[in-house]
Image: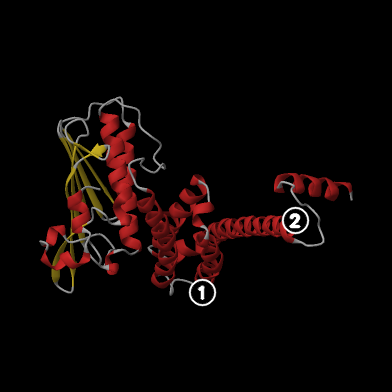
């Protein structure tokens, strides 16, 4: 982070900044639809990064899906990304996001191409607001995928899509992890509210997911990359899409699909529950280890003067095995 970015992050300065430089802080913008909006953008950019055999420079790529429209222009010097909520989008707050990034071989900052534009326009209460998403945790993954696309177009090796950018600071990574965990809980709440009148059994299943999910996100950082990815995809993509499609069916079509929908939601619940149980077992193992360690160190009935803790634990382990 350069001195200008550090200065902009000072809250006392925000009222004096032009609108396009003010950080996005409106919590109403980050809802389930916005997370899906960002997710589909990531998928599109990632797909382009995988097209290593095709010429992509001086070309424009477009994709429309679920009411979202995306346009990516790849130039020799810059990459332009547009993300737009169309009129068909189910989002309550219509958004337009514009991102422009220098190609990393032209102008670099922190190892990635320098960002020249990162603005979001959104409508709320009949007003249009303009804010910066440069440092907003919910959009950091988009910048990372743009960096991957830049590397791919340049013919360089591309890191895995689910890796955190090496240029991200530990603090930023921690904030993003916390934000991800919170976004999953918020997403499930949004889904439950949005589809609460769809079916009683579906509502009960969604409600039953809340407790194991809350237990899981308490130690979200302990999950491996694949488990995190599955949870995010399930809550930000699969469940909303499943229920939205089911809601659009005719009564007879719903009746035909009902059992499979319930079965699918049950499987998702089982997955979340298993993650919670595995994490709980991990917590218990750690607690047992700490209790054992402290007993060996501080129990006055055990005489271990001038003996290393590791040696004490090995002896204790042998004693336990011999019993």
Disc 1/disc 2 C-alpha distance (Å): 54 Å
Image location of residue 258, percent across then percent down: 52, 63
Image location of residue 6, percent across then percent down: 22, 54
Residue 296: give its label.
2
Image location of residue 281, percent across then percent down: 66, 57
Q: Quadrant of residue 124?
A: bottom left
Q: Secondary structure at mark 1?
A: helix
Residue ID at (39%, 44%): 164
Q: Is residue 46 above or below residue 88?
A: above
Q: Secondary structure at mark 2?
A: helix
Q: Position of 314 compared to 211: left or right?
A: right
Camera-nearest label, 1 or 2? 2
Q: Is residue 223 above or below residue 151?
A: below
Q: Which residue is mark 1?
A: 200
Q: Residue furthest right?
A: 323
Image location of residue 223, percent across then percent down: 53, 51
Q: Quadrant of residue 235?
A: bottom left
Residue ID at (38%, 34%): 159
Q: Quadrant of residue 145?
A: top left
Q: Is residue 70 visible?
A: yes
Between 14 and 88, the one lying in front of the other is 14
Between 87 and 295, the one lying in front of the other is 295
- Classed neighbour count for the residue bearing mark 2: other residues with Cα under 10 Å, few (<14), some (14–19), many (≥20): some
């Amino acid at each position: 982070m350069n001195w200008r970015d550090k200065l902009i992050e000072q809250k006392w300065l925000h009222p004096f900044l032009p609108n396009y430089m003010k950080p996005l802080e409106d919590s109403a913008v980050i809802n389930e639809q916005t997370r899906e909006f960002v997710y589909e953008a990531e998928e599109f950019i990632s797909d382009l990064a995988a097209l290593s055999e095709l010429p992509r420079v001086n070309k424009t790529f477009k994709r429309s899906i679920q009411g979202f429209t995306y346009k990516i222009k790849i130039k020799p010097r810059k990459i332009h990304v547009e993300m737009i909520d169309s009129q068909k989008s189910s989002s309550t707050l219509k958004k337009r996001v514009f991102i422009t990034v220098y190609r990393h071989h032209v102008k670099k900052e922190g190892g990635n191409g320098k960002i020249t534009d990162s603005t979001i326009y959104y409508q709320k209460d009949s007003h249009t607001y303009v804010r910066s998403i440069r440092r907003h945790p919910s959009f950091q993954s988009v910048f990372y995928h743009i960096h991957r696309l830049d590397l791919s177009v340049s013919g360089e090796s591309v890191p895995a899509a689910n890796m955190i950018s090496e240029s991200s600071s530990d603090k930023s990574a921690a904030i993003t992890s916390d934000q991800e965990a919170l976004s999953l809980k918020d997403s499930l709440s949004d889904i439950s509210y949005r589809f609460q009148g769809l079916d009683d059994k579906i509502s009960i299943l969604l409600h039953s997911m809340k407790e194991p999910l809350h237990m899981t996100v308490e130690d979200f950082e302990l999950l491996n990359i694949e488990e995190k990815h599955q949870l995010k995809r399930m809550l930000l993509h699969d469940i909303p899409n499943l229920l939205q499609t089911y809601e659009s069916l005719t009564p007879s079509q719903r009746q035909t699909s009902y059992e499979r929908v319930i079965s699918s939601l049950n499987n998702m619940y089982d997955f979340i529950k298993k993650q919670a149980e595995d994490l709980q077992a991990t917590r218990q193992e750690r607690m047992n280890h700490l209790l054992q360690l402290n007993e060996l160190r501080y129990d006055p009935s055990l005489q271990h003067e001038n003996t290393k803790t590791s040696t004490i634990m090995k002896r204790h382990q042998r004693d336990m095995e011999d019993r």
